[in-house]
Amino acid sequence: MKARVTVTLKNGILDPQGKAIEGALRSQGLAGIDNVRQGKIFDIEISVGDKAAAEGLLREACEKLLANMVVEDYRVEIL
Amino acid sequence: MNAAVILFPGSNRERDAARALEVSTGRKPKIVWHGDHDLPSGTDLVVLPGGFSYGDYLRCGAIAAHAPIMDAIRAHAARGGLVLGICNGFQILVESGLLPGVLMRNANLRFICKMQHLRIERADTAFTSQYLQGQIVKVAIAHGEGNYVADDETIRRIEAEGRVAFRYCDESGNLDGQANPNGSINNIAGIYSERFNVLGLMPHPENLIDPMMGGTDGCGLFESLALFNTPGHNAA
């Protein structure tokens, strides 16, 4: 089973990297870019029985390691 | 004072920390591998040194925070044992939950390596008894992720409990303007745990213990630790 975990900064947490990328995109003359937030994607292969167990496993992985719950949120997708 | 300095893959200031401790305490600290499960018996102080454990992969300190030795360090801290995390060591302490908050990328996105003034917020702890409250010291900072962030409630709590150890300031002790190098909330450079036995700080006092290296303002921290559990010096 393949899954994708996306980790992003919580709303309200300053993202200086996102801001720098946003400024760089604007400086390319790309009109209409309003806001950029940078995050991380993890593509994970897992071998568990069913989708519910896979989601549970990945949520645990996020809360233990992949995301810092103080400043980050995560999203789990089974592909 | 029996100290143990933990060595992670990618640590690079462990010898600086060990030397500072040896100079102040007269005893050579044990260097302990992160894959060990136990601290040497009789350990009073655990030091998590600076560096780039695991190449700063994922988040600074995140992978080291799950190293086998960390359970022993948690137990040591729970017993009231002293823990000092310097720079990457501070990042490991927040990732492991031993201290609150998180250290984000510096607000200016740059790795900052320079001399920096700090204000000693209290001089009644095991780490700072040989400083004066409000004293301004000059030490080195060298980090890319030292921007201390925590939610409003956590900041209120650590401020109310007097758990800010050091604040970034200028040479006169002012906190405003250019005094804050990395964007940390309330100029926070270091914080204590609830019981004041765990300290994490971004600056490098271990590098300012010899006049040849540009100053000795870091000595106070190690001299304070050297007095731990000696008569008349049982600070908080």
Image (cartoon, grey):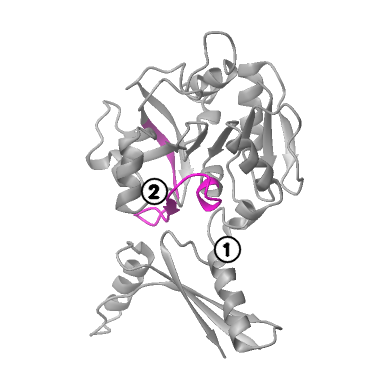
**What residue is drawn where x is 56% and y is 34%?**
B84
Tell me the residue at 55%/39% (across/down).
B85
Which residue does the numbered mark 2 point to in the structure image?
A: B148
Left or right, residue A25 beside residue B222: left
What's under tag 2, amino acid-wise? Tyr
Find out whether the residues at labels 2 and 1 contact each other: C-beta distance under 8 Å.
no
The furthest residue to the top: B231
Looking at the picture, how far across and down is residue A42, in whole percent? 56, 77
**Looking at the image, residue A45 lies above or below residue B95:** below
Q: CA distance from mark 2 to mark 1?
A: 21 Å
**SS type, badge 1:** helix
Which residue of the protein is positioned furthest toward the bottom in this rendering? A79
In the rendered image, the quadrant that contains the N terminus of chain A is: bottom right
Q: Estimate the x, y position of residue B74 in percent, counting from the top left.
A: 61, 43
On whether disc 2 and disc 1 are found on a single subunit, the reply is no
Is residue A5 visible in this depiction of the protein? yes
- Tell me, yes or no, if residue B184 can be seen here: no
In what element is the residue under mark 2?
Answer: strand
What is the magenta range?
B93-117
Residue B9: image tag: none
Please report, as a chain letter, where disc 1 is located: A
Quadrant for the C terminus of chain A, please.
bottom right
The residue under label 1 is which amino acid type?
Lys
The residue closer to the viewer here, B229 or B122, is B229
Residue at left offset 27%, top offset 28% = B173
Give the residue at x 42% y 20%: B124
Q: Nearer the viewer, mark 2 or mark 1?
A: 1
Residue B104 forms part of the magenta stretch = yes
Whether residue B13 is in magenta: the answer is: no
Residue under pointer 1: A64
Q: Position of residue B158 (x, y in %)?
A: 36, 40
